[in-house]
Image (cartoon, rainbow, N blue to C red):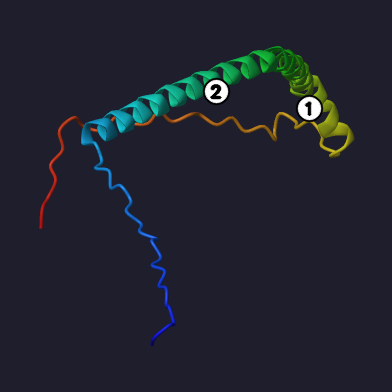
Amino acid sequence: MSGRRVEYVVKQNVRNRVVREVDQTRQRELWRTLAVGCVLVATLLFSLWQRAGLLQQGYLLPEMQEESAEQEAIQQHLKIQLEALRTPERIEQMAIGELDLVMPTQEEVVILNRVVPVQPANSAIVAVR
């Protein structure tokens, strides 16, 4: 090997990464801050949800009051109509005209006496087998 010169190149690709230790105090503080932030955001969202619901109910209230007044007017009209249908003159007119009924004579009329129920005794004896 006389006269021949050989050169070697050494590749210097050394990866010495710095390993950092996790600071437990800083980690706890980070999680605590994150938890407090989440609680604050949840409280804010809940408050906004309540306010939106209250506003929506406020908008529905006049419509409900109007519907209630309409329903009360309908109920009053139906009560008057029911009382008109219950009059004895109308019932008699329907019985004679539509059902072909006739007024009974004095001989056909039967008067029933109402029987008053007897009150049971306060003390009772019960037989046991």
Q: Is residue 7 above or below residue 82?
A: below
Mark 2 lies on a secondary structure that is helix
Q: For residue 91, which numbered disc appears in the image?
A: 1
Q: How many marks?
A: 2
Q: Quadrant of the N terminus?
A: bottom left
Q: Is residue 74 left or right of residue 109?
A: right
Q: What residue lies at 64% left-to-right and 13% top-to-bottom?
A: 58
Q: What residue lies at 79% left-to-right and 20% top-to-bottom?
A: 81
Q: Residue furthest bottom?
A: 1
Looking at the rendered structure, the kind of residue marked 2 is Trp
Q: Are marks 2 and 1 in contact (CB under 8 Å)?
A: no
Looking at the rendered structure, the kind of residue marked 1 is Ile
- Specify the quadrant of the image occupied by residue 116: top left
Q: What residue lies at 84% left-to-right and 39% top-to-bottom?
A: 99
Mark 1 lies on a secondary structure that is helix
Q: Nearer the viewer, residue 98 or 57?
A: 57
Of badges 2 and 1, nearer the viewer stands 2
Name the residue that disc number 2 marks. Answer: 49
Q: Is residue 24 left or right of residue 4?
A: left
Residue count near mark 1 (Cα–Cα under 10 Å), binned few <14, some 14–19, many ≥20: few
Q: Nearer the viewer, residue 5 or 123?
A: 5
